[in-house]
């Protein structure tokens, strides 16, 4: 006897993107896909909205404040600590309105988060890392064809220094280990190098991350890594293409690991089964 197993309670199904090349790939999307393709599906294909985690909300507001500072340096406008604190507060409330709700337990947690953000931003402005000169570019969005990639590569660099060094800013709860930090962000850093080289013909002298760390006394730590050689570029292009192929093939499956501890899609993940209608023989 043949028994037909009916559709599972949740499947990734055939998304509207299935079998269609995405029109670009970004290092952020590729890293998300390679980290857990099913979570990528929930977030970016099914677009299942969840309350914003507090740490993510704080990181975005800090990022907006640093962007305001770098833009002010670039334009020669007001880059005083007061102006940047105002930019932080505006981003904090605008993000709640536009991307919220945020997972705050109560008003006290919200106020602590806001105060932490202001401390971290002030620490950056006080640090030797705060840009003194005019940057070459701020929030640079590039889209380039890269040999070996079947779709264009896109990336948004936080800052490009005068020397053509791309800099990306990260908020962190603990001091980063430099070796691990560079390895963790390899796809992003090397993608920026590929984009800069394709767009300008210039090779950056280094690929930099600046961490603003939300410890009791906030710290600002720069992690520099050397520009990628041919092997590293080839490896990153292969990783980006692996993500493109997975998306085109509609390949979304659970990839259990450490990231599950902070994943907001555990219920949907537990309900997942492969989408193909299955048949099995029952004796
Ligand atoms: S719980 Fe883990 S395996 Fe499931 S979607 Fe989230 S990150 Fe992926």
Image: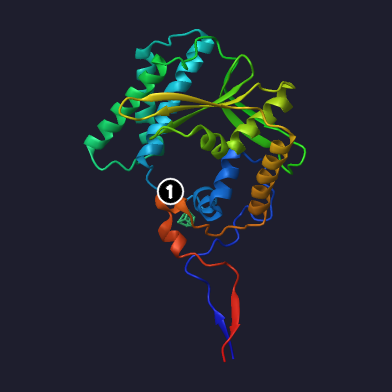
**Residue 245 left/right relative to 7:** right
**Residue 21 left/right relative to 15:** right
Residue most toward the right? 147
Residue at screen point 52% across, 35% down: 181
- Percent across and percent down for residue 120 are 36, 24
Residue at screen point 59% across, 91% down: 1
Residue that carries the numbered disc 1 in the rendered image: 49
Label 1 sits on a secondary structure element that is loop
**Residue 188 left/right relative to 124:** right
Q: Quick check: is the Cβ at mark 1 less than 8 Å away from ligand 1?
A: no
The quadrant of the picture occupied by the C terminus is bottom right
Name the quadrant containing residue 125: top left
Given residues 106 and 176, the one toward you in this image is 176
- Percent across and percent down for residue 9 are 47, 69
Q: How is the image coloured?
A: rainbow
- Percent across and percent down for residue 232 are 69, 37
Does 190 appear above or below 88? below
Given residues 88 and 128, the one toward you in this image is 128
């Amino acid at each position: 006897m043949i028994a037909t197993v009916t559709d599972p309670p949740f499947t990734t199904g055939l998304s509207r993107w299935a079998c269609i090349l995405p029109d670009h790939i970004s290092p952020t999307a590729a890293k998300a896909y390679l980290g857990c393709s099913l979570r990528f599906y929930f977030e970016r294909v099914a677009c299942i909205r969840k309350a914003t985690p507090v740490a993510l909300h704080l990181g975005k507001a800090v990022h907006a404040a640093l962007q305001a500072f770098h833009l002010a340096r670039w334009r020669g406008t007001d880059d005083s600590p007061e102006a940047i604190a105002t930019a932080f507060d505006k981003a904090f409330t605008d993000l709640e309105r536009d991307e919220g709700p945020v997972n705050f337990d109560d008003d006290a947690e919200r106020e602590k988060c806001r105060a932490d953000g202001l401390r971290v931003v002030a620490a950056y402005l006080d640090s030797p890392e705060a840009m003194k000169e005019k940057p070459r570019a701020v929030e640079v969005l590039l889209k380039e064809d890269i040999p070996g990639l079947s779709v264009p590569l896109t990336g948004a660099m936080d800052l490009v220094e005068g020397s053509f060094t791309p800099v990306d800013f990260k908020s962190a709860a603990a001091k980063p280990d430099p070796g691990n930090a560079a390895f963790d962000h390899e796809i992003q850093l090397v993608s920026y190098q590929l984009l800069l080289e394709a767009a300008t013909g210039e090779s950056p002298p280094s690929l930099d991350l600046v961490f603003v760390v939300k410890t009791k006394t906030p710290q600002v730590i720069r992690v520099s890594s050397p520009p990628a050689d041919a092997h590293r570029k080839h490896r990153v292009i292969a990783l980006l293409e692996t993500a493109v192929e997975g998306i085109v093939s509609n390949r979304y499956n659970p990839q259990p690991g450490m990231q599950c501890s902070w994943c907001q899609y555990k219920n949907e993940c537990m309900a997942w089964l492969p989408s193909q209608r299955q048949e099995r023989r029952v004796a």
